[in-house]
Amino acid sequence: MTRPIDAVLARLEGHKLRENGRDRWRACCPAHGGSNPSALSIGIGAGDQVLLRCWHGCTVDEVAGAVGLELHDLFPPRTAAGGGSAPLKRRRMLTAGQALDLLDEEMTLAWVCAADLAEGRPLDAVTRERLLLGAARVSMLRSEARA
């Protein structure tokens, strides 16, 4: 029987898919069509379900749909009721080091923007949008760390 992760990885082959640790991968997100090979985190949960996180804000449903899958395809088939299994433990999508690297990147951007503003240089629209995206990424990191 094929595991759900095998179906997902096969569909992400053309999206700069790369291994990022044990049971973890990164790829370009097929939902928003970006070219950043770190935009999508892929992992395997304790119950063998596929974990997807787009760092640009695409939903799991959007990501699955973009590769021709539905949400139920991300989960293994259910076993008979009353199997007596223990509650599932959530696995983190990022290591502490990966989270710190992302925070460092966003803080560097914020520092450069603050320095420009302090020198009286206004931020252009593209830079303001990227700064807002950075704030959203830090917020998602906080949520991930607290989960």
Image (cartoon, grey):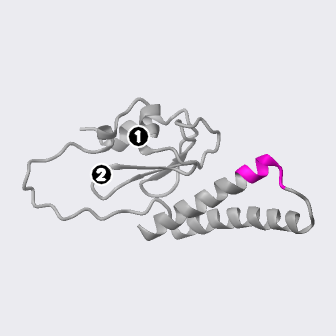
Residue 117 left/right relative to 96: right
Residue 24 left/right relative to 4: right
81 above or below 96?
A: above
Rendering coords of residue 43 (x, y %): 42, 52
Per the rendering, the mark at residue 133 is: none
Real-space CA distance between mark 2 and mark 1, rounded to the nearest whole angstrom: 18 Å
Q: Residue at x 83, y 50 (%)?
A: 124
The type of residue carrying mark 1 is Asp
Mark 2, secondary structure of its residue: loop
- Residue nearest the observer in this picture, 133 or 72: 133
Residue numbers of the magenta segment = 123-129
Depth check, mark 2 against mark 1: the one in front is 1
Q: Are marks 2 and 1 in contact (CB under 8 Å)?
A: no
The type of residue carrying mark 2 is Asp
Rendering coords of residue 52 (x, y %): 44, 48
Rendering coords of residue 128 (x, y %): 75, 53
SS majority, magenta: helix
Q: Is residue 128 magenta?
A: yes
- Residue at label 2? 48
Quarter occupied by residue 76: top left
- If the image is split into quadrants, where does the C terminus sit? bottom left
Q: Residue at x 9, y 56 (%)?
A: 83
- If the image is split into quadrants, where does the N terminus sit? top left
58 above or below 69?
A: below
Q: Residue at x 52, y 54 (%)?
A: 20
Mark 1, secondary structure of its residue: helix
Q: Residue at x 7, y 56 (%)?
A: 82
- Residue nearest the observer in this picture, 125 or 142: 125
Looking at the image, how many numbered discs can be counted on the residues?
2
Q: Is residue 115 magenta?
A: no
- Residue at label 1? 61
Q: Counting other residues with Cα less than 10 Å from the Cα at mark 2, is it few (<14), some (14-19), or many (20 or more)?
A: some
